[in-house]
Image (spheres, rainbow, N blue to C red):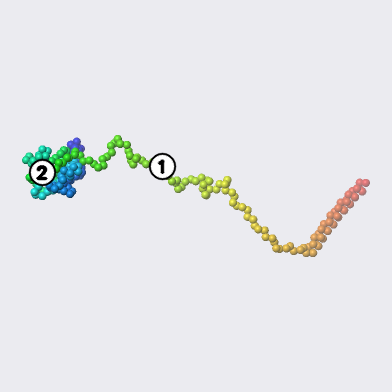
Amino acid sequence: MGVLEIILRVSFVAMFIKLAMATNHIVGGPNGGWDTSSDLQTWASSQQFSVGDNLIFNYPPNHDVVEVTKPDYDSCQQTNPIQSYNDGATTITLTSQGKRYFICGTIGHCNQGMKVEIDTLATQISPASPAPAAESPSISDSPIISIIPSAAPEESISSPAESPDSKSPLFEPNMESPTFSPVIPSTEFLAPSSPLAQHSQDVSASSTEKGNLQAFISIVLSFVVVFIAFF
């Protein structure tokens, strides 16, 4: 892409931006117009005119618009006009910076106040101009550091002392206590021993005693026999 093409494109974009930002000023409006009854000087002082803006003159056939120099403006003379219009709906684009002067060419109308001075500024002042590059960043542009502690994660490793499921041998006693069964006294009574069983026990005891006695006697007799045999 050539340099000339770049310049042309930039110029086209700049012109398009100017046209998009241009303001249409209805002369004498909104409660007046291009006539002898409107306070055109007060209206002009309340406006801000920039390069690219448009002046719109609306008027009936008994009026016209004549652009003049500063001396002719002050003396209401139209003998050497810069430009004149009589179409009833005149639009004049402010193409350069500086002051421009307009009067009505009908005899006596300029002296009755039908004249306006337009002071055109070089550029239109944007209501929201960008901040300079050297300006320190505002608080809203800086990263926000949160001082509020973040919530703990739902799934965290809990300590043995805090976990309801963990069992610590130091703090959890053995809950299994011995089970005591109530002792119910027996209502059953032992049947008394029968005389027959008692007699059998006595006979058995007597037989045992007799056997022991016989064994003792046999031992004594053996000692006696041995003793006689040696002597």
Q: Which residue matches tag 2?
A: 111
Name the one closer to the observer, 63 or 114: 114
Q: Which residue matches tag 1?
A: 147
* Spot occupied by residue 97 in the image (x, y as percentages of width and height): 16, 38
Query: Which residue shows up at 19% across the image and 38% down it?
Result: 122
Rendered position, 80 above or below 196: above
* Spot occupied by residue 108 in the image (x, y as percentages of width and height): 8, 45
Name the one closer to the observer, 83 or 28: 28
Name the one closer to the observer, 231 or 142: 142
Residue 25 shown left or right of residue 193 in the figure: left
Label 1 crowd (10 A; few <14 / some 14-19 / many >=20): few
Q: What's the residue type where badge 2 is placed? A: Asn
Is residue 22 shown to the viewer in this render?
A: no
Q: Quadrant of the N terminus?
A: top left
Query: Which residue shows up at 67% across the image and 60% down it?
Result: 184
- Distance between mark 1 and mark 2 Cα atoms: 72 Å
* Spot occupied by residue 120 in the image (x, y as percentages of width and height): 17, 40
Give the SS element for disc 1. Answer: loop
